[in-house]
Structures are given as C-alpha cells and as structure tokens.
Amino acid sequence: MIDILLTIVAFNTLIVVFKLFDKFGVDNLQALIINYFVAGFCGLYFSDQEFSITYILNAPWIYHAALVGVLFIITFNLYAIGTQKVGIAVTTVANKLSLLIPVGFALILYPNEQLSYLKIIGFIMAIVGIYLSSTKKRKLSFDKKYLVLIILVFIGQGFADTIFNHAQKTVVNDDEKGLFFMCLMFIAGISGILILIGKSIKQKPKFEIKNSIGGIVLGLPNFASLIFFFNALESSGLSASQVFPVVSMGIVTVSALVGLVLFKEKLTLLNWIGLGFAVLAIFFITFL
C-alpha cells in the first residue's frame, strides 16, 4: 500500500507543479519535453541493468515503451487542447474515466483478476465520484463538434495505462525497470520535439530558461510517480483492477484538497459529495 500512497503523493506533486506553470507563464510543451528527458536520465541512473543499445533494441518491452511514450505526449497535448476548447471539467472527467479501459482489459486478460458485486459497486462509486468532483455545475456540457477530441483523450490515456500494465505483468523484469522507463521517457521527449517542430511551422516558439527549469522540476516527481505506480501494480498485494481505480480516486481526492488548501479553490456541495463517493469507492474496491 505504501507504493500506492507514494504514487498519489507524486502525482499530486505533478499537479501542483503544473499549477505553478500557469502562474509563472511556463510553456507546457517545452517544459514537458525537458521533463521527459530528465525522467529518462533518472531511469538510466537507477537502472540495475547495464546500458546497451543492442540489449534495448532486442528487449521484449521496447515496443511497449515506444507506444506508451508516444501516447503520453499525444494524450497530454489532446488534454491541453481539450481544456481550451471544452473546458477543464469535461476533459478531466474523460481523462479520469479512462481507468475503465485498463481495468476492463485486466479483468479479461489476467486470470487472477476477480470481479465481485462489491467491486462493481466500488467502480460505480468511482465513476460518480469522478463526475461530481470534477464539475462545478450539475451537468457537463460542451460543443458536440469536439466530441472526437474528448473520446481521443479517453482512449489515449486508457490505452497508455493498459499497455503500461501489460508491460509490467508480462515483459519487464525488476532489473530492467530503469531501462524501460528511460526508453519510455526518451521516446516521449523525442515525440514532443517533433510536435514542437510541427507547431513552429505556424508559430515560432519562444525559448526561455524558465521552461527548462520547470521541466527539470517536473521530471523528478514524474519519474517517481511512474516507478511507484509500477511497483504498486507489481507488489501492492492488490490486483490491477483494484490499483487503477484506487490510485485514480486517491489522486482526485487529494488534488481537490490540495487545491482547496494551497490555491484557495472552492469546492461546491457536489464536489464534496463526489469526494465522499471517491473515498467510499476506495474502501469498497480495496477492503471488501
């Protein structure tokens, strides 16, 4: 359980850093690119496996790392566009509900995953909790022409998590974790550079030192969040179909409280009810 708690802490540190990006005018994409390379070097530093290009190219997890890395950067950009076009609430709900994809695949692919009535109740509570805690109004509304964008955020995050979980369960050994994360992060960073080049065709980017500093600050908790999450999937004592919703609910709950305390973000009655559902969901999924 300690890895789950550390994952939640690390993810919420990321959220705080992103909040500070907005405050200090840090370019998200540039900082994200730097962040991925910083996290990649962390993976290399903490790797128990000696670095070898030949070894990496022949590793059974290289395709997993490549897919997750590309999906990470693409989904982030879709998320950023979504917050601009349809709002934070709708995009956040789509992003968080994506846990249904890895949970669904886990229940189908892995025989040790068991689905009980109480766990189903917990999943329903999780969905309700995500919805209520992510919106300031009674319903989510947006321009339907952006529906595809919202669906892509849902699918992108969901499949990134699914592939990540599959890699942990089938092809990544303990001593290879560092190299796996290094490749994943470097591929995400390189993909980000390609996106930045594409964007620069229309508008020349402005490079500032604060973007690099922001990326460095972001890279450390980003690496920590993934390594702790990997460990939680591996040795928390919970199945993947439990870990994903518990981590998601933990992030939703703690991030709301962090926003309330640090950034004076107001929570509506529905938000508090949503957080209550999130806590109940964690209890039902984990302990019953």
Image (tube, grey):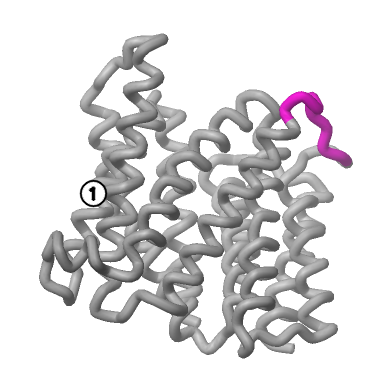
Magenta segment main secondary structure: loop
Q: Which residues are magenta?
A: 139-146
108 shown above or below 97: below
In the image: residue 35, left or right of residue 75: left
Residue 176 pos. (x, y %): 26, 74
- Quarter of the image that includes the C terminus: bottom right
**Visible residue check, residue 106:** yes
Instruction: Name the residue: 27% across, 53% down.
Output: 39
Name which residue type carries label 1.
Answer: Val
Q: Give whichever of 254, 93 is nearer the camera.
A: 93
In the image: residue 206, left or right of residue 148: left
Instruction: Name the residue: 58% across, 77% down.
Output: 240
Residue 178 pos. (x, y %): 25, 68
Residue 106 pos. (x, y %): 62, 75
In the image: residue 22, left or right of residue 245: left
Q: Is residue 269 magenta?
A: no
24 shown above or below 272: above
Q: Which residue is mark 1?
A: 38
| Mark 1 neighbour density, 10 Å: few (under 14) some (14–19) many (20 or more) | many
Instruction: Name the residue: 69% across, 69% down.
Output: 104
Element type at mark 1: helix
Q: Give whichever of 48, 256 is nearer the camera.
A: 48
Q: Is residue 143 magenta?
A: yes
Residue 251 pos. (x, y %): 57, 60
Q: Which of the 4 quarters of the picture holds residue 25?
A: top left
